Amino acid sequence: MGKIIKNGVIYSGSGTGIDSVARSSITQINTDVTGIQSDVTGIQSDISGIQSDVTQAQSDINSLSDSAIGKTDAQELAQKHGEIFNSYVGDKINKATNDYAHAEGKGTLASGEESHAEGNDSKATGQGSHAEGGNCTATGQYAHAEGYSTESHGFASHAEGTTTTATKEASHAEGYHSRAVGDYSHAENYSTASGDYSHAEGKETTAAGMYAHAEGQKCAATNSCAHAEGYNTQANGNYCHTEGYNTQAVGDYSHAQGYGTKAISSFQHVLGKYNTVDSSNTYLVIVGNGTGDNVGDRSNAATLDWSGNLALAGGIILTSPNGTKYKITVANDGTLNTESVS
C-alpha cells in the first residue's frame, strides 16, 4: 500500500487512486515551473531592451561628434586641449586643431598653436594669431585679422576693415582695400604702403619708398623719405616734398607746391602754377605763372638762380617815403624807366 502527502493530508491506498493524485501534483509542478520560466524570459527581454537603448544612445553620441568636428579631429582635440563652440555640421564645422587653439562661430579654423578664430569662415593658422569676422585670415605669427575678408600674413601684423592686407612684419592695413606691404608700414583707405616704415592714407595713395608718406587722393611718394600730399601729386626724389594739385617733385631734396608745378632739379623749390620746367638745375627758386600743362603754356613770373640773381618777368615796384609807388622797368637798350602806379 502506498502513501502520498499533499497539502498536509496523507493519502493511502493502491492502484488508480494514488496514481491519479500523483499525476495531478506533477502537472501542477510543471505549470509552476513553466510560469517561472516565462517570468525569466520576460526579465531577459527587458534586459535586452535596456542594452539596445544604451547601444542606440552611444551611437547617437558618436554620430553627433562625428558630424560636428570629425572623429579624427575630436580625438586630436582631446589631446591638444583645443576648444570648439557653436559648431555646425557639414562643410561649416569649426576646427581647433592645435595646442590651446580656440574656434567658434561657423566654419572657422584655428590651426595655429594658441590661435583664435571666430565669426564666419575665419582662419587663424599662425602661432598666437587671431582672426575674427567674415572670411578673415591670420597666417602670420601673432597676426590679427578682423572685419570682412581681411588678411594678415606678417609677423605681428594687423589687418582690419574690408579686403585689407597686412603682408610684412608689424605692418598695419585698415579701412577699405588697403595694402601694407612693407615692414612696419601703415596703409589706410584704398591705399598701398609698400616701402618699409612707409605710411599711405587717403584714397588711392602709394607710399613706395622707405620712410615715405603719401596722403590725400592719387598721391605717390616713391623714394626714400619722400612726402606727397594733396591731389595727384608725385614725390619721386629722395627726401623731396610735393603738395597741392597735380604737382611733381623729381629732384632729390626738391619741393613743388601749388598747381601743376614741377621741381625737376635737386634742391629746387617751385611754387605758383605751371612753371617752365628747369631740368638743367639753373634755378634755385621758380615762381610759375603759366596757364596750362603744354610746353607753350608754361611760364615763369620770377626765378632766382644759384648765384643769387633774381629775374622778374615784370618790373620792380618800389614805394617812396611819401607812399607813392613807382614801377621800374628796363628797355631793350638797358635803359631803366620809372613810372608811378596806383
Image (cartoon, grey):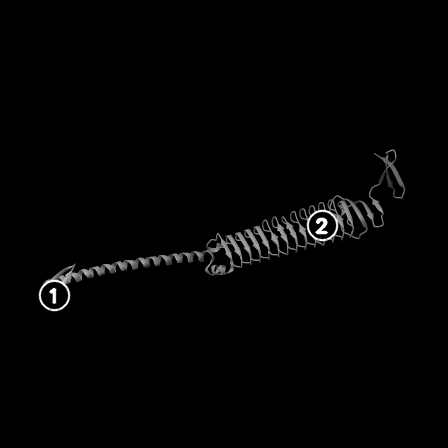
Which numbered marker is on residue 2?
Answer: 1
The residue lying toward the viewer, choosing from 218 and 57, is 57
Residue 243 vs residue 171: left or right?
right
Q: CA distance from mark 1 to mark 2?
A: 132 Å
> Judging from the image, what secondary structure is the residue with disc 2 in?
strand
Q: Nearer the viewer, residue 313 or 139?
A: 139
State the residue lying farthest toward the bottom: 1
Question: Which amino acid, mark 2?
Answer: His
Q: Is residue 25 left or right of residue 138?
A: left
Residue at the (76%, 49%) spot, across then down: 255
Residue at the spot of label 2: 227
Picture coordinates of residue 35, whole percent (x, y): 23, 59
The residue depicted at 11 percent of the width and 65 percent of the height is: 2
Q: Residues within 10 Å of mark 1 (few under 14, many from 20)?
A: few
What amino acid is labelled 1 in the image?
Gly
Return the mark for residue 273: none
Q: Residue at x 29, y 58 (%)?
A: 43
Q: Nearer the viewer, mark 1 or mark 2?
A: 1
